[in-house]
Amino acid sequence: MFNVPENQASLWTTYSFQKGDLKGLGFGLGLFYVGERQGDSDNSFTVPDYLRTDAAIYYRRDNFNAAINIRNLFNVDYISNADNGRIFLQSGAPLTIIGSISWEF
């Protein structure tokens, strides 16, 4: 099958301070690997593998949540999708930063 890697893996981990003045502050780091894959059903070309790194910093206290999520931290240039041909190869998103604030009640 085209656009399906033989190997793919991801790891996401977080750490939150549990005590003291920094209680509620946390950090996260994620690694996403997608292996080489065929670009079309004829197997006439391959799409290269890539490793993307994501990160987050957040603060959670009582019902308040605030976060900054960073996708593609090192701005890696990669192909995220092939359309069964060489005409359309979709590039992965560049460095993206998203902030959010929420209050739960």
Image (cartoon, helix red, strand yellow):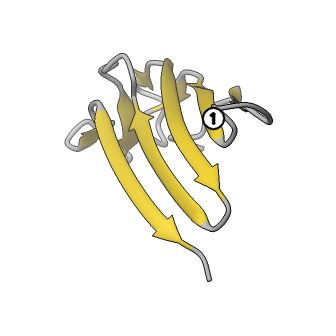
Examine the rendering and report whether any part of residue 27 can be seen.
Answer: yes
Q: Secondary structure at mark 1?
A: strand
Q: Quadrant of residue 32?
A: top right
Q: Residue at x 63, y 68 (%)?
A: 63
Image coordinates of residue 22 in percent, x first then y, are 63, 32
Q: Quadrant of residue 24?
A: top right
Query: Would you call the spot at circle 1 few (<14 residues within 10 Å), some (14-19), or many (20 or more)?
Result: some
Observer-nearest of 1 and 35: 35
Image height of 14 relative to 77, above or below: below
Q: Is residue 28 left or right of residue 2?
A: right
Quarter of the rendering occupied by the C terminus: bottom right
Image coordinates of residue 89 in percent, x first then y, are 27, 38
Quarter of the rendering occupied by the N terminus: top right
Q: Is residue 63 left or right of residue 81?
A: right
Q: Residue at x 35, y 50 (%)?
A: 99
Q: Residue at x 79, y 33 (%)?
A: 19
Observer-nearest of 4 and 1: 4
Examine the rendering and report whether any part of residue 83 can be seen.
Answer: no
Which amino acid is tagged 1? Answer: Gly
Image coordinates of residue 35 in percent, x first then y, are 59, 22
- How many numbered badges does the structure rendering display? 1
Q: Quadrant of residue 18?
A: top right
Q: Residue furthest front?
A: 21
Q: Residue furthest bottom?
A: 105
Observer-nearest of 97 and 15: 15
Report which residue position mark 1 lands on. Answer: 26
Q: Residue furthest left?
A: 87
Observer-nearest of 89 and 80: 80
Image coordinates of residue 41 in percent, x first then y, are 49, 43
Q: Residue at x 54, y 28 (%)?
A: 37
Image height of 29 relative to 4, above or below: above
